[in-house]
Image (cartoon, rainbow, N blue to C red):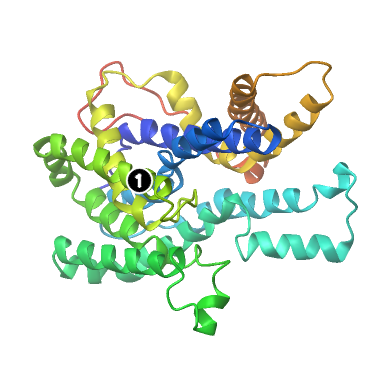
Amino acid sequence: MKRTMIQEIFLIRTIACLCVVFIHAMTMTQHNYTLAESTDDLLYLFKLTLMFATPLFIMISEFLLSYSYPDKLPRGFWKKRILYILVPYVLIAGLYSAVPLWTGGGLTWEYFLERFFDRTFLGLWHGYFVLIIFQFYALHFLLKKFFDRYPAWLMISLSLFVNLFYLGIYNFGWFYENAFVYGLRDYYKLPFTGWIFYFTVAYYAGKHIDTFINFLNKYKYYLIAGALITGAIPLLMRLNRIYSVVSSKRFDIVLYTFFIFCILYLIARKMKHIPNLVMWISSSSYGIYLLHPLLQSSTMNALKDMPFHMNFGVHIIVMFLIGVIGPMLITYVLNKVPYGALIVGKFNVPKKPKVKQQTTMAG
């Protein structure tokens, strides 16, 4: 029997989307302003606390897949995801590859094809997470019976070990004397081994949602403490110059992301109503994710020609608003024209019930 959409996911997806846009707004500002060293350090530390954003998208994908289709994938599953996820991914990757055409950088056919190949197949742009999600779609189909055969605690523990060990190889350069390992250093984010814990824990949480909710209610204070502790680890590592890279592929944000997912789910369950704005942002999150750097960089270039100086804090806010509102409007408008959803993905705002149900919603 088909299960209804989970209302809590709208809030989690919205938070993940807004954090991604905010991270890029801060990064662009740092690249274009000469900031005091202390200010720059604070921005880096703040960005580290938001590194759960992209992994959250990956968790949401498998969580919903496992919850919605606990027994088998429905007919038309691959067709819908190819049309409204993979096709927009390819088209927008082509758009980014053609950017030099209107920036005056010059673009040859060979250069365009090289840029296009790097993005679509090697994931050398911010949309790389789509390639990971499609790996998870395949893994869900291939590993379902295997996962159902063994205890959840065992498979989650093994996945956590594999995930941490794999990221540790590239975070700290372990085994770089091996030519194969070293050769993958620019692409290590693509294999599912760097994200397998998110997949496994989301699979069991989605399929056994009642058990998951009981777990959240029973251990909520431990989850909050876990988020505070694991969230402090990346900050301490950067302050002590142990590992300073601001990235969602850090080994020390794996558990942190899990705790954040749990806390956001708890918060969403406490809300009587999910605000319309949250649902709109959630419904256009794919378009926002794909388009926001393009609109942010275009706005930033336009601001350089303005006859006034903008405070760096205001600049961050402007970049953030442009990165959210612009893509959301584009996604909404394109979904009003034939085949527009093939460019930026679907924009469907589900109908919201007057009274929030415990775990589900209409639409």
Q: Residue at x 87, y 62 (%)?
A: 109
Q: Quadrant of the C terminus?
A: top left
* Mark 1, other Cα within 10 Å: few <14 / some 14–19 / many ≥20: some
Residue 266 placed where, x, y %? 23, 32
Q: Residue at x 54, y 41 (%)?
A: 286
Q: Is residue 7 left or right of residue 324?
A: left
Residue 326 placed where, x, y %? 65, 27
Q: Is residue 120 left or right of residue 64?
A: right
Give the structural element (helix, strand or loop) at label 1.
helix
Q: Is residue 267 left or right of residue 19?
A: left
Outermost residue on the left side: it is 218
Q: Is residue 4 above or below residue 200?
A: above
Q: Is residue 300 above or below residue 134?
A: above
Say if residue 67 shows up in the picture: yes
Q: Nearer the viewer, residue 21 or 311?
A: 311
Callout 1 amino acid: Leu
Q: Is residue 70 above or below residue 276?
A: below
Q: Residue at x 90, y 52 (%)?
A: 106
Residue 341 placed where, x, y %? 62, 41
Say if residue 2 shows up in the picture: no
Q: Nearer the viewer, residue 65 or 302?
A: 302
Q: Residue at x 29, y 47 (%)?
A: 258
Q: How many marks?
A: 1
The residue indicated by pointer 1 is 236
Residue 139 placed where, x, y %? 38, 67
Q: Nearer the viewer, residue 130 or 175?
A: 175
